[in-house]
């Protein structure tokens, strides 16, 4: 059993000065002039939280393991009606290496099956997002006092972003700890994602934080480590790990949809702007598909969303053409040691991830032939 209480406060102040007579006199008071265009400004951030938790562990015959935890957390960053939220998790384990039929094999040091399911919450945003905030400005100074303008709209229902994670895995060790192999499969469902929701100008604020988003993820992780050579003077080991993961956005806010439309309509960039669309990956690459050049007219043929052909380029026809997220990524390394001298080499790898060909976009497709261009602009037209 346990509990915690936390209070965090930070303040900041900014003042711009120039004309210091010496590098040794660095204090702000030694400036000869102070900026009149940039007035002194600052800020304050105050957040408090409280939580209580209980955790238990039970082991039967050194074979069967069960863990459980429960936590009730509260934070001042959330709305007045949703300050607290419960979180819990449970895990199961089976030490197969303690069974006689595994011991009889002789080469198994550890063979553990495990699984877990739990809820977690996050507080990854600034304070005061759930309360009305105002900015007092000397630009609105008059005989009755100083005026204030709203900069943040209250949301008393702002609540925790929660992630439900399920995991099953295997941990193993063989041949006197000469070989270790681990494997995990997981799924994650994130609900109540915090997203900015646009407000009408008449409200006085441009947006408000709201719980309006869902995202699903799943993946497979593995790792293997082994000692190939081990004697009095020499030791050589190899290790490799990898991850295959996939993430899908299930729901986004109307404000984010409008942002997607704005990014999709801007064509001055050499690469597509980032977009987040429902039922697509957050790392998807969006573009208008091309069927090549019509030999009869010399015009490029574009493919619309419905699959029909057109000569007119329309940003609204952008679809997910690729994904930056690789199919498999990880690292592998080798350690060679002779007495007190060691050599360690490490590499990383990625398979299957897509990249947008910015060079072709800026040097081949949309070019001015009077400037430097890719040779394909002249030889492959």
Image (cartoon, rainbow, N blue to C red):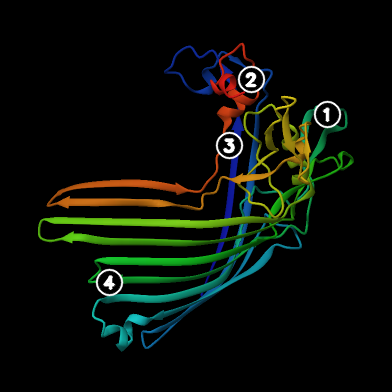
What's the CA distance linking mark 4 and mark 3? 44 Å
Q: Secondary structure at mark 1?
A: strand
Residue 174, disc: 4
Q: Secondary structure at mark 2?
A: loop
Residue 367, disc: 2
Q: Earlier in the sequence, mark 3 or mark 1?
A: 1
What's the CA distance linking mark 3 and mark 2? 17 Å
Residue 251, quarter of picture: bottom right
> Where residue 3 appears, x then y in whole percent?
54, 68
Front disc: 4 or 2: 2
- Disc 2, disc 1: CB below 8 Å? no
Q: Is residue 262 visible?
A: no
What's the CA distance linking mark 4 and mark 2? 61 Å
Q: Earlier in the sequence, mark 2 or mark 1?
A: 1
What's the CA distance linking mark 1 and mark 4? 75 Å
Residue 366, quarter of picture: top right
> Where residue 213 appears, x then y in whole percent?
71, 56
Q: In the depicted view, which residue is nearer to us: 186 or 324? A: 324
Residue 364, quarter of picture: top right
Taking the spot 79% from the left edge, 48% from the top edge, the residue there is 254
Instruction: Characterize the local packing of mark 4: few (<14), some (14-19) or many (20 or more) Cα atoms within 10 angstroms.
Output: some
Tally of numbered tags:
4
Front disc: 3 or 2: 2
Q: Which residue is mark 1?
A: 140
> Where residue 32 appears, x then y in whole percent?
56, 13
Q: Secondary structure at mark 3?
A: loop
Instruction: Characterize the local packing of mark 3: few (<14), some (14-19) or many (20 or more) Cα atoms within 10 angstroms.
Output: some
Q: Earlier in the sequence, mark 1 or mark 4?
A: 1
Instruction: Characterize the local packing of mark 2: few (<14), some (14-19) or many (20 or more) Cα atoms within 10 angstroms.
Output: some
Q: Viewed as shown, does residue 283 lie left or right of 311?
A: left
- Disc 4, disc 3: CB below 8 Å? no
């Amino acid at each position: 059993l346990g509990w915690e209480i936390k209070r965090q406060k930070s303040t900041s102040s900014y003042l711009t000065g120039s004309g210091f007579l010496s590098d040794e006199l660095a204090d702000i008071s030694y400036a000869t002039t102070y900026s009149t265009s940039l007035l002194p400004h600052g800020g304050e951030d105050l957040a408090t939280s409280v939580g209580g938790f209980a955790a238990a562990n039970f082991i039967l015959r050194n074979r069967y393991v069960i863990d459980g935890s429960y936590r009730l957390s509260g934070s001042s960053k959330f709305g007045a009606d949703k300050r607290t939220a419960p979180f819990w998790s449970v895990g199961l384990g089976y030490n197969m290496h303690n069974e006689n039929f595994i011991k009889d094999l002789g080469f198994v040091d550890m063979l553990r099956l495990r699984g877990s399911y739990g809820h977690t919450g996050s507080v990854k945003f600034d304070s005061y997002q759930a309360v009305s905030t105002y900015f007092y400005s000397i630009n609105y100074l008059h005989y009755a006092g100083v005026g204030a303008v709203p900069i943040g709209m209250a949301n008393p229902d702002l609540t925790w972003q929660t992630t439900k994670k399920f995991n099953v895995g295997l941990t193993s060790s063989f041949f006197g700890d000469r070989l270790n192999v681990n494997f995990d499969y997981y799924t994650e469902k994130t609900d109540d994602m915090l997203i900015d929701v646009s407000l009408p100008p008449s409200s006085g604020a441009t947006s408000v934080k709201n719980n309006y988003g869902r995202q699903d993820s799943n993946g497979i992780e593995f790792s293997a480590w082994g000692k190939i050579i081990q004697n009095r003077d020499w030791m050589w080991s190899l290790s490799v790990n990898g991850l295959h993961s996939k993430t899908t956005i299930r729901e986004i806010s109307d404000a984010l949809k409008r942002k997607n439309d704005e990014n999709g309509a801007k064509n001055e960039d050499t690469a597509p702007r980032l977009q987040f669309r429902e039922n697509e990956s957050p790392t998807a690459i969006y573009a208008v598909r091309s069927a090549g050049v019509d030999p009869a007219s010399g015009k490029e043929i574009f493919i619309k969303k419905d699959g029909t052909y057109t000569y007119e380029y329309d940003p609204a026809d952008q679809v997910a053409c690729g994904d930056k997220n690789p199919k498999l990524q990880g690292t592998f390394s080798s350690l060679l040691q002779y007495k007190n001298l060691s050599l360690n080499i490490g590499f990383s790898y990625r398979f299957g991830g897509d990249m947008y060909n910015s060079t072709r976009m800026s040097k081949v497709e949309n070019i001015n032939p009077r400037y430097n261009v890719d040779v394909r602009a002249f030889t492959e037209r």
